[in-house]
């Protein structure tokens, strides 16, 4: 039997650092990268641009299935994302788009439309996949599952710094409220709620550098290889 391509699944709430950690891991290992959250953000953004209600699950599923998306990097190695040929990287990271992504991610028809696309990223030599249900749903057979979290206060500070660096002005208090609301929504939704897989390694990144978190996960990956 042909061996399965290895997967490192990294799940966790918004602002836990999983996207940055996943990119560093993929670079260190030479693996492919899947930013699953971006696909939901792209669906929400594309629907908004087309005037489609975030309550219309059928229309949203069609939007998800027909996404014209391209992933790349800028001159500094930062992620860039194009939708319909237009760079939407900054727009995707707004709180409005994030809130829309959380809503469409709770709809089963949308998840069904995107799951085949997500699994297609599993190619040799391996994949680092970050999201909210990578270890519980999309790659339930992943060899290493990590649930990465951080305190709500730290996550809000990180998000605030990130957005300010992109020229987006938003208050820290508003970010804290949005993060609390999104945590509740993601954890309480009936479809693929945010939760650690039973066999996930728990990692709290509060007060830790990206390098320390990456090295911890690399150590776990070596244990399982």
Image (cartoon, helix red, strand yellow):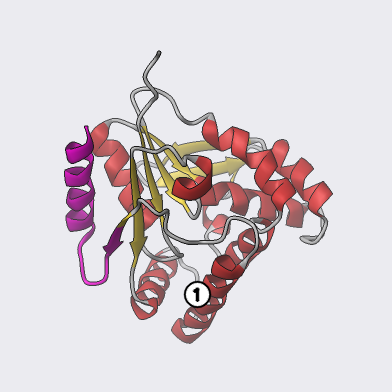
Question: Which image quarter: residue 142?
Answer: top left
Number of numbered callouts drawn: 1
In the rendered view, would you say 145 is above or below 17?
Answer: above
* Residue drawn at point x = 62 percent, y = 59 percent: 101
Q: Is residue 199 left or right of residue 171?
A: left
In the rendered view, would you say 125 is above or below 149?
Answer: above
Q: Nearer the viewer, residue 92 or 223?
A: 223
Q: Nearer the viewer, residue 75 or 177?
A: 177
Q: Residue furthest bottom?
A: 173
Majority SS type along the magenta span: helix
Q: Is residue 83 left or right of residue 153?
A: right
In the rendered view, would you say 56 is above or below 206?
Answer: above
Q: Quadrant of the N terminus?
A: top left
Disc 1 target residue: 179
* Residue drawn at point x = 63 percent, y = 65 percent: 189
Local secondary structure at mark 1: helix
Residue 222 in the magenta stretch? The answer is: yes
Mark 1 crowd level (few <14, some 14–19, many ≥20, 10 Å Cα): many
* Residue drawn at point x = 16 percent, y = 45 percent: 219
Residue 224 in the magenta stretch? The answer is: yes
Q: Quadrant of the C terminus?
A: top left
Q: Nearer the viewer, residue 73 or 190?
A: 190
Residue 76 in sight:
no
In the rendered view, would you say 154 is above or below 16?
Answer: below
Give x and y (percent) for residue 72.
46, 37
* Residue drawn at point x = 34 percent, y = 37 percent: 143
Give x and y (percent) for residue 106.
66, 59
Magenta extent: 202-225
Residue 55 in sight:
yes
Give x and y (percent) for residue 87.
57, 45
Question: Which image quarter: residue 70?
Answer: top right
């Amino acid at each position: 039997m042909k061996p399965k391509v290895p997967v490192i699944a990294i799940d966790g709430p918004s602002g836990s650092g999983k996207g940055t950690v996943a990119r560093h891991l993929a670079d260190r290992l030479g693996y492919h990268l899947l930013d699953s959250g971006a696909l939901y953000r792209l669906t929400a953004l594309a629907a908004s641009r087309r005037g489609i209600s975030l309550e219309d699950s059928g229309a949203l599923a069609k939007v998800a299935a027909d996404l014209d998306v391209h992933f790349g990097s800028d001159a500094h190695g930062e992620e860039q994302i194009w939708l319909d040929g237009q760079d939407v990287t900054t727009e995707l990271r707004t709180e409005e788009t994030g809130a829309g992504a959380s809503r469409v991610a709770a709809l089963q028809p949308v998840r069904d439309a995107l799951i085949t696309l997500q699994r297609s990223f599993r190619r040799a030599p391996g994949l680092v996949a970050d999201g909210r249900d990578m270890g519980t749903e999309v790659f339930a057979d992943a060899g290493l599952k990590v649930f990465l979290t951080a305190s709500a206060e730290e996550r809000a500070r990180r998000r605030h710094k990130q957005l300010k660096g992109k020229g987006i002005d938003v208050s820290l208090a508003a970010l804290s409220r949005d993060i609390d609301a999104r945590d509740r929504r993601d954890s309480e939704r009936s479809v693929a709620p945010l939760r650690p897989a039973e066999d996930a390694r728990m990692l709290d990144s509060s007060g830790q550098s990206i390098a320390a978190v990456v090295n911890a996960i690399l150590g776990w990956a070596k244990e399982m290889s």
